[in-house]
Image (cartoon, rainbow, N blue to C red):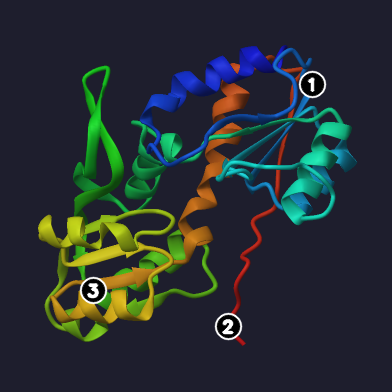
Amino acid sequence: MKCREIIEILEKLAPKSCACDWDNPGLLAGRMEKEVKKILLTLDADDAAVEHAKKIGADMLISHHPLIFKPVKHVSDEDFIGRRLVSLIQSDISYYAMHTNFDSAPGCMADIVADRLNFVDQKPLELMGELSGTAYGIGKTGMLKKPMTGIELAKEVKNRFGLPFVTVYGRELFEDTPVTKAATCPGAGGSEIKEALSAGVQAFITGDISHHEGIDAAAQGMMIIDAGHYGLEHVFMDFMDGFLRDRLPGEIAIEKMAVRFPAAVV
């Protein structure tokens, strides 16, 4: 099966038109007409993923986060991004990224995370548009199927996503009063705090929250559960594994990188 044919399947799931205008999804390196017999899935196209793709003889690497965000003035082995690109091209590995288009498209990242958290009456946190009559956008709001205290919710997030830890701001807000309405923005959610406050949620489950963002949100009555950027988004690999196995010929092998949290508490 050609790389181009696989990309057509990927872009039916998460059209590039669903991406934020600053983003850079798509085929970032390699050949459209490459014959693909083995695919490696990863959250990040880091050194470990690139080397593993080469080791297993992958023909295509699919990541969530794009290796290239800004215009590239040169591709050489003099910097870490250039080294990865050179390595992928030399190994004839086609590299495709699906980022905010996957974050926002119906049935993708925001829905996967909200469903795992048992949100009901879900709505996009930041509405971006409609796709085939379905509203889509960054993040989700919803009512908790089972109201719980703030710490109970933090533990629920930790357990449901297999996290080594979460960081909580405003834990004192919901020690006695249960959380009934929450929002999630997998990845970096600091820019969505105003949206979450406007939506009237009591808890915001996201990642990459700074000190001041956390304490300022708590001062406005909203608890924040910071699960880390990787913490919620690693579900990309399991989801895409199942999605592609259902749609690609059985002779195409699919592997995924092991879940490996980049941060630790010591």
Q: Which residue is mark 3?
A: 223
Instruction: Locate residue 241: give its quadrant.
Output: top right
Q: Residue 102 placed where, x, y %?
A: 44, 36
Identity, as a three-letter code, of the amino acid under mark 2: Val
Instruction: Locate residue 123: give its quadrant.
Output: top left
Identified at 44% across, 56% down, the residue is: 187
Q: CA distance from mark 3 to mark 1?
A: 46 Å
Q: How many other residues sit within 10 Å of disc 2, few (<14), some (14-19) or many (≥20)?
A: few
Identity, as a three-letter code, of the amino acid under mark 1: Lys
Q: Residue 216 placed where, x, y %?
A: 22, 78
Q: Secondary structure under badge 3?
A: strand
Number of labels in the image equals 3
Q: Which residue is mark 1?
A: 37
Q: Which mark is residue 262?
A: none
Whichever of labels 2 and 3 marks the residue nearer the N terminus, that label is 3
Q: Left or right of 233: which side holds 216? A: left
Q: Which residue is mark 2?
A: 265
Q: CA distance from mark 1 to mark 2?
A: 39 Å
Q: Left or right of 178: which side holds 48? A: right
Q: Quadrant of the N terminus?
A: top right
Check the image and report above or below for 11 versus 169.
above
Q: How many other residues sit within 10 Å of disc 1, few (<14), some (14-19) or many (≥20)?
A: some
Whichever of labels 3 and 1 marks the residue nearer the N terminus, that label is 1
Q: Residue 210 placed where, x, y %?
A: 38, 75
